[in-house]
Each structure stands twice: as C-alpha cells, then as structure tokens.
C-alpha cells in the first residue's frame, strides 16, 4: 500500500488517496492512530460530511452536540463548524472510518433532488445510530472503484437515508447522549448482540428496570433497544456477507438471529435487498 497522505490538522489521522472526487463530493477511508486518552484537538469541517465508524470508539463534539461513537454509528459534520474527536474510551488501537463529504451546494442540490427544497443543507444532529443500509451503501461505493456514476448515485441515497432517520427528532441526539446508563446499555447490546439477549439482561447490566430502560434508551440513543439490537446484528451480517463465504443460514445464526426467515425479512426491509443479492454486489439494488 502506498504511503497515506497526512491530515495537517491532526497528525494521528491518515486518509487513503481519493478514489474519486467529483461534483463537490469526496469519498475516502480514514485511519486514525490516536492512542487511548489522547487529548482532543480542535478542528474544522471543510465540508458537510457523513462518516461511518467501521472500527474503534471515539468521542465526538461539535456545535450540534456530542456523542460517543462505536462501529456502525454515523458522525455528521457541517461545513465551517468546529469539532473535536477524543479517545477516552478507546482501547488504544485507533479507529477506521469511511468518510463521505459534500460541499454545501452539492448537499443542497441533493436535498432538492430528494424533494426537500428549502431544507437547510446542515445536519441538526451530531450523530446517528447505526443505519445498516447506509453502511452497506458506503462499503459498496468503496468497492466500485470509480465505476460510472456510482459516487453521485450513492451519495444521493446516503443523504436521503440519513435525513429520513433524523427528520422526526424533536431534540438533537447528542444532548441525550449524556445519559450514561443508556450508553452503557448500548455497549451491552453491542457486545452481546449475537446472544439470545433479553431486555431484562440489558436492564440488569445497567441497574434499572426494563420499562425504565426502554423509555430512557430511545430518548438518549434515538431508537428503541430492539431497533438498536437489530441494527447491530445487521451490521455484523453485512460484514460476514462481504468478508466471508459463510452460508447465509450460518450468517444469520452467527449474527444473533434464531430464525432464518426473520433474518431474511429484516435484512431486506432495513438494508434494501436480500442477503444473497447483497453478496453478489447489490449496490444498484440499494439505490432504489
């Protein structure tokens, strides 16, 4: 692999050379080598961005709020806004991300094409819980190697999915992330998603009752505990479908599903295509 260019604003963050940059859109992979507890540095977004965390854990703070990001989460940035990333809860191995950025005019044009004319080209949330369809789209975009109009079409689909996910929120996600018990419950779900996990198991792990957890979790994380569990399992399934030749039935069980038909139904509903079609290269199916 060639030497990675260095981000002058943060010497611990390296980017793969751009596969393509067009129409005000950039797509790249970011490798951060920051150690555990490394001091956060003040930086500034040079474009609107949607960043998928693939590996690791990092804290993120911007004017829209703050969030603790783990694999599958989406970091949102607005052009010109200051931000800082921290690694207090990191294991010291850094983090890997897929970074999609758009100049404000490009984002405004995308929103208009999606029927959202008049919507300000800014994100009102600092982050979004895992969206398996967005993760699949970004992974497929990196694999397309600049083929045709993949970048523009994929970016449009990603923007649409992210704005749909945040459009109904009455309060920024980041302010709710101050709820430490909800974050601890999310950590429990992430680490035990492949098990036959009950809401009682999660509630006991953070020392609250099940109904109290269900109410506070959605307020803090932005989705219900069940939705979060399904998304984490889908993220695991996407990785296995992409990186292994494991039979689809085994992928389902390895990801935590006890019922294959439920896995197939949930994957198609939330990702946008069947597991088999995704494995065969389903980016075009995801754009619909």
Image: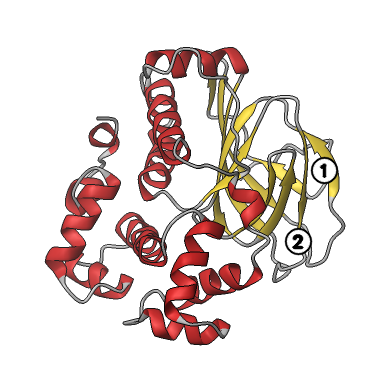
Q: Let me know if residue 71 appears in the view.
A: no
Classify 180 as above or below 199.
above
Which residue is nearer to you in this view: 180 or 154? 180
For the point 77% across and 58% down, which residue is it?
34
Alpha carbons under labels 2 and 1: distance apart: 14 Å
Classify 111 as above or below 198.
above
In the figure, is residue 213 to the left or right of 63?
left
Pick whichever of labels 2 and 1 is earlier in the sequence: 1
Q: Which marked residue is nearer to the observer: mark 2 or mark 1?
A: 2
- In the picture, the disc for residue 87 is 2
Q: Let me know if residue 48 appears in the view.
A: yes
Residue 17, horizontal then vertical, whole percent = 62, 33
Which type of secondary structure does the marked residue at label 2 adopt? loop
In the figure, is residue 166 to the left or right of 78?
left
- In the picture, the disc for residue 10 is 1
Residue 70, horizontal then vertical, whole percent = 57, 60
- In the picture, the disc for residue 187 is none
């Amino acid at each position: 692999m060639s030497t990675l260019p260095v981000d002058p604003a943060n010497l611990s963050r390296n980017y793969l050379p751009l596969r393509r940059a067009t129409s005000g859109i950039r797509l790249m992979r970011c490798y951060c080598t920051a150690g555990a507890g490394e001091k956060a540095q003040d930086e500034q977004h040079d474009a609107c961005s949607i960043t998928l965390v693939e590996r690791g854990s990092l804290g993120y703070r911007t004017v829209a709020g703050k969030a603790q990001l783990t694999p599958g989460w989406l970091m949102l940035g607005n052009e010109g806004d200051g931000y800082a990333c921290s690694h207090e809860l990191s294991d010291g191995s850094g983090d890997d991300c897929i970074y999609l950025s758009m100049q404000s005019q490009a984002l405004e044009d995308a929103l208009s094409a999606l029927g959202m004319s008049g919507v300000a080209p800014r994100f009102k949330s600092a982050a979004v819980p895992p969206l398996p369809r967005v993760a699949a789209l970004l992974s497929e975009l990196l694999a397309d190697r600049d083929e045709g109009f993949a970048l523009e079409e994929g970016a449009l689909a990603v923007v649409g999915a992210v704005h749909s996910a945040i459009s109904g929120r009455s309060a920024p996600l980041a302010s709710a992330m101050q709820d430490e018990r909800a974050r601890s419950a999310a950590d429990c779900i992430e680490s035990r998603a492949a098990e036959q996990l009950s809401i009682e198991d999660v509630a006991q792990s953070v020392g609250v009752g099940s109904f109290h957890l269900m109410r506070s979790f959605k307020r803090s994380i932005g989705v219900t505990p069940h939705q979060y569990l399904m998304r984490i399992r889908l993220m695991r399934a996407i990785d296995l479908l992409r990186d292994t030749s494991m039979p689809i039935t085994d992928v389902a069980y390895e990801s935590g599903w006890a019922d294959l038909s439920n896995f197939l139904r949930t994957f198609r509903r939330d990702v946008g295509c069947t597991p088999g079609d995704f494995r065969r290269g389903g980016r075009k199916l995801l754009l619909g």
